[in-house]
Amino acid sequence: MSYNSVDKLKVVDFIGRGLVASLFVQAVSGKVSGYVSTVDFIASRGIPEPLAAVCLLAAILVLVAGSILFVFARNSKIGASLLLLFLVPTTLIFHTFPVDAGFVRNLAVIGALILAITRSTAGATPNFRAIRRKC
């Protein structure tokens, strides 16, 4: 693979991570602007209100840090892990019973984040020859 091809892959990888992160960045703006109503919604799922406010604040911090690290860090694994830390419990608590459109969307994003973690660095591709040699 030529040097130019590697640069193109890195750009495409960066754009892909940016597009995935845009989902989380958009969610942050809604959580901040509608903080009180979001706390009320979290509390409606059985989480005590004081804890719901703390959970929402933690979610906002994890979303911001995870999105920044996922897009701009040299190794996107930490950012993807933080976003998974937010997304898995959110999916189970808010989109499972009853199952809604957010459930399927979140499953797709969870899959993308898992792929990002297993690839671990921008522009990396799995080396199947090395894997086959280990077997």
Image (tube, helix red, strand yellow):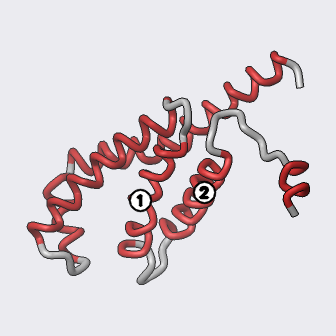
**Which label number is shown at residue 114?**
2
Left or right: where does residue 21 sit relative to residue 116?
Answer: left
Q: Nearer the viewer, residue 87 or 78?
A: 78
Q: Residue furthest front?
A: 134
Few, some or many residues within 10 Å of mark 2 (<14, 14–19, 20+): some
- Name the amino acid type tagged 2: Ile
Q: Earlier in the sequence, mark 2 or mark 1?
A: 1
**Which label number is shown at residue 85?**
1
Residue at image position (48%, 40%) is 22
Residue at image position (90%, 49%) is 129
- Name the amino acid type tagged 1: Leu
Image quadrant occupied by the N terminus: top right
Residue at image position (45%, 37%) is 69
What percent of the width, then of the height, locates residue 64?
A: 34, 41
Image quadrant occupied by the C terminus: bottom right
* SS for dot 2: helix
Few, some or many residues within 10 Å of mark 1 (<14, 14–19, 20+): some
Judge whether 41 appears above or below 116 on screen: below
Residue at image position (59%, 50%) is 117
Judge whether 127 appears above or below 5 on screen: below
Q: CA distance from mark 2 to mark 1?
A: 11 Å
Q: Nearer the viewer, residue 13 or 128?
A: 128
